[in-house]
Amino acid sequence: REYVVRAAKSEAVGEEAKPAGDFDAFRPYLEKIIDMKIQIADLWGYGADRYDALLDVYEPGITVEKLDAVFAALRAKLVPLAERIAAAPQPDVSFLGRNVPVDKQRAFGEFILREIGYDFAAGRLDASAHPFATGLNPGDVRVTTRYKEDDAGFSLFAVIHEGGHALYEQNISPELAGTNLCEGTSMGIHESQSRLWENMIGRSLPFWERYYGDFRRITGEFADVELEKFYRAVNEVKPSLIRTEADELTYNLHIMVRYELEKDLINRRLRAADLPEAWNAKYKEYLGIEPPNHTLGVLQDVHWSGGGFGYFPSYSLGNMYAAQIMDAMRRALPDLDGLIREGRFGPIREWLTEKIYRHGKMLTPAEAIRSAAGADLDPAYLTDYLTEKYTRLYNL
Ligand code: CO
């Protein structure tokens, strides 16, 4: 009871401290939350590392030992890759800021959701401050997006992302409806489906070969922008300060920063008072940039203020699972790019349903990845995918 009250207060204080950039106002609340998370972890019990107890809430079976190994592999490949990209000629992205009225963005978003197989008879698309998907049962899975008139790509990729979460929930076996097995098996596996549809399909060249004409027709814009130019722009890699706006590659570096910091906080190797300095140092090290204030730095997320320690790694696990699942699907459906280029998503959805979706929580995360890929989690699929994609895109 004490924890729930503390977390609610801390979240409210965090919300006020963020726009003001006032870490000192937030610090006593954060310290208390960390103390209580440590107590909770100690009461729950754990194997090798106290942080394992917190990870287990979001991704059963994942431990510090496993994460240290996969993040080391990501760091070794992705930090130098991001540096090489930063030194290469940059794509023109200026046209992405053109004004596209909300009703046209909405029309294209709905069109794409139908194309990938989202069932509007079992869901709907609305607007909200932060995009999300929520499944009440397989017959009612709703998605939201956020519209920015000067950034049509933002709402579109949010729609595809949330659409990926929704396809998972809509395709859980009806046999499981009404039981607590009728949901995605973990945060990481869920995120693998949103990332697979958003990035690996939705930002691919075959996808835009199929849909760029529709995009131009429905938005009434971009007639003067060539396909290849558009494709490069929506795949821009640029180190930035804000996690939620990060690209497909640097997103993982944002997560690595948070993983390393929260692991140290929970093991009392890092004090809350020293957190802002440690945050800035890691941004400098991994992304080559430093936040000018705490609003754009350590205060940006709601996770820690609400007590969500152990959640962040799910995002990168989602990217790693997605790359591994995509590789397996490519072997099962050899003409995967052709299917995407023809807008034929049925076989893709059916394969994912057979391997992952229909099982709901009947499979653990480790069993789900084995069901789809026939192997355990392996970060090499993500680093290979990103290296191949961006070497080509940036002519490295
Ligand atoms: Co998501």
Image (cartoon, rainbow, N blue to C red):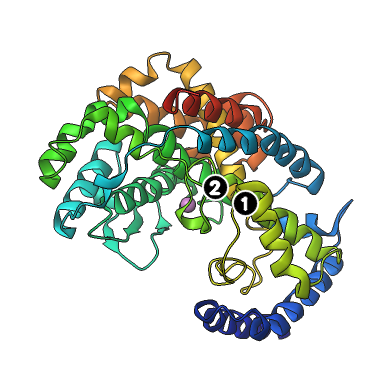
What residue do we see at 24% from left, 29% from top? Answer: 227
Q: Nearer the viewer, residue 312 or 183?
A: 312
Q: Nearer the viewer, residue 285 or 300?
A: 285
Q: In the picture shown, does residue 291 fall above or below 155?
A: below
Task: Choose top left, top right, bottom left or bottom right for residue 106.
Answer: bottom left
On residue 295, the disc is none
Amino acid type shown at disc 1: Ile
Work out which residue is located at the far right of the displayed protein and give it. Answer: 48
- Residue under numbered circle 2: 251
Q: Position of residue 214 (x, y in %)?
A: 15, 36
What residue do we see at 27% from left, 44% from top? Answer: 113
- Residue under numbered circle 1: 255
Q: CA distance from mark 2 to mark 1?
A: 7 Å
Whether residue 341 is visible, yes or no, is yes
Q: Are marks 2 and 1 in contact (CB under 8 Å)?
A: yes
In the image, is the residue at mark 1 within 8 Å of ligand 1 by its beta carbon?
no
Q: Nearer the viewer, residue 75 or 164?
A: 75
Q: Position of residue 112 (x, y in %)?
A: 25, 41
Q: Nearer the viewer, residue 291 or 250?
A: 291
Q: Position of residue 108 (x, y in %)?
A: 19, 46
Q: In the picture shown, does residue 285 fall above or below 306?
A: above
Mark 1 Cα-neighbour bin, 10 Å: few <14, some 14–19, many ≥20? many
Task: Choose top left, top right, bottom left or bottom right for residue 202.
Answer: top left
Q: Secondary structure at mark 2?
A: helix
Amino acid type shown at disc 2: Tyr
Q: Position of residue 394 (x, y in %)?
A: 44, 28
> As drawn, is 49 to the left or to the right of 200?
right
